[in-house]
């Protein structure tokens, strides 16, 4: 995506590229964008970029929901009731 390439070129020598820097850059960028700006960027995306965007959104949203529910951390009631010596 052209936007990603431009941001990378602008900040490649200013940031370390660790997750914290990338999060900070992304959130700072989004903070400056209006809804119309974002919709314009989406309109400019090709089909693969749009699928990638939606895929990442779905993955991260589902991860958040499962984490919120503490899914996978629950043990089966049968295991909890067994008396193992």
Image (tube, rainbow, N blue to C red):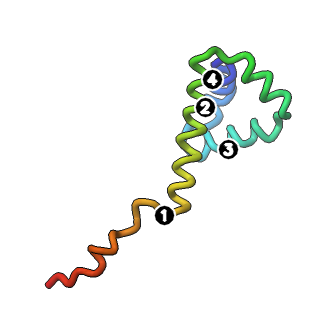
Which residue matches tag 3? 24
Query: Which of the two labelled residues, at mark 2 and mark 1, occupies the earlier sequence position?
Result: 2
Front one among 2 and 61: 61
Q: Is residue 79 above or below residue 6?
A: below
Q: Which mark is residue 50?
A: 4
For the residues bearing labels 2 and 1, Cβ distance under 8 angstroms: no
User: Could you give the CA–CA distance between mark 1 and mark 4, rounded to whole angstroms?
Assistant: 30 Å
Estimate the spatial distance between the alpha carbons at disc 2 and disc 1, rounded to whole Å: 24 Å
Q: Where does label 2 land, which residue?
A: 54
State the residue lying farthest toward the left. 85
Secondary element type, mark 1: loop
* Mark 2–mark 4 CB contact (< 8 Å): yes
Question: Which residue matches tag 1?
Answer: 70
Q: Is residue 21 above or below residue 38?
A: below
- In this view, the mark in front (4 or 3): 4
Mark 4: which secondary structure? helix
Q: Position of residue 35 (x, y in %)?
A: 83, 33
Does label 1 or label 4 sit earlier along the sequence? 4
């Amino acid at each position: 995506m052209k936007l990603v390439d431009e941001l990378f070129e602008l900040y490649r020598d200013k940031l370390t590229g660790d997750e914290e820097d990338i999060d900070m850059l992304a959130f700072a960028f989004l903070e400056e964008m209006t809804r119309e700006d974002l919709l314009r960027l989406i309109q400019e995306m090709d089909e693969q970029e749009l699928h990638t965007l939606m895929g990442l959104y779905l993955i991260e949203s589902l991860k958040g929901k499962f984490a919120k529910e503490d899914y996978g951390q629950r043990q089966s009631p049968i295991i909890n009731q067994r008396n193992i010596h």
